[in-house]
Amino acid sequence: MLPDFLIRATIAGLGVAIIAAPLGCFVVWRRMAYFGEATAHAALLGIALSLAIEMPIFAGTLLAALLMAFTVSQLSGRGLASDTLLGVSAHAGLALGLVVASFLSGVRIDLMAYLFGDILAVSINDLYTIWIGAIFVLLLIYWRWSPMLVSTLNEELAYSNGINPKREKLILTIALAITVAVSIKVVGLLLISALLIIPAAAARNTSDTPEMMVFITAVVGTISAISGLQFSYFFNSPPGPSIVCVSLIFFLLLSSKNSWKFR
């Protein structure tokens, strides 16, 4: 029999793996890896402000992530390259969050848990938050799948079909912000982008269609979550990094298989 905390951690890991699958694919297709990282780093400022004004951490994290994404979208193309804006936003959010956290008196903050995750401490309320967020994002992606995919492939083709690529990017941004907010407990702010990118990058080498890539990404993420948790439990390693390391093994194996195939 598994301990209750490990069962809760497994259910949480499955939720994050499933929600990260379609979003990770879009992040890889659109080459938005740095965008996901910047959103995650900005969330630390939301956590610090949530603790300062005594509001739910999920709400503060979501608000900070959305604000960062909206700011970058508005400033893009106004004299600074997107990667420069994302770099400034990512490091500014992380630094401001740490500074604000240092001024909080009477509040105990476990920065390691927020930065690298504390999935073994997931509560029932955390599970509700993760799975409600996952269901919302999955329904959103299902609803906008075709327009988002067309916008990703070719913006001119999207315009010719009456699709607004900027609107689809905004929807993707909202989905990313929600994913970051619900994933903090599982892998932490510093590893969220890794969980988004690595399984999707691994699946890209073995997929013939976008839908197949999403499915394989979900499988890789699910196995990584379960195997990483088991490894962490038996060898007393940090859970979040262990999950990411397992997904890295999948990436290396599938990449190697793909390179052998074309030799």
Image: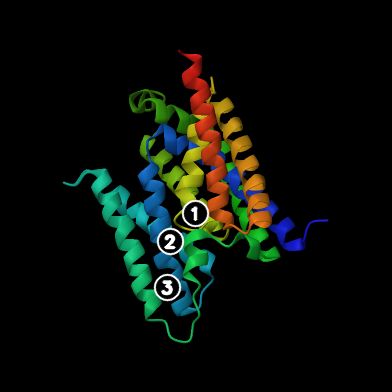
Residue located 61% across and 59% down the image = 119
Circle 1: residue type? Val
Residue located 52% across and 65% down the image = 113
From this viewpoint, which residue is outermost toward the right? 1
Quadrant in the picture for the N terminus: bottom right
Residue 162 visible to the viewer? no
Circle 3: residue type? Leu
Circle 2: residue type? Ala
Q: Which mark is residue 49?
A: 3
Of label 1 and label 3, which has the lower sequence position? 3
Q: Residues within 10 Å of mark 2 (few under 14, many from 20)?
A: many
Residue located 45% across and 48% down the image = 193
Q: Could you tell me residue 137's position as x and y percent?
A: 56, 46
Q: CA distance from mark 1 to mark 3?
A: 16 Å
Q: Residue at label 2?
A: 43
Quadrant in the picture for the C terminus: top left
Q: Residues within 10 Å of mark 3 (few under 14, many from 20)?
A: many
Of label 2 and label 1, which has the lower sequence position? 2
Q: Secondary structure at mark 2?
A: helix
Q: Could you tell me residue 26's position as x and y percent?
A: 46, 36
Q: Could you tell me residue 125's position as x and y percent?
A: 67, 65
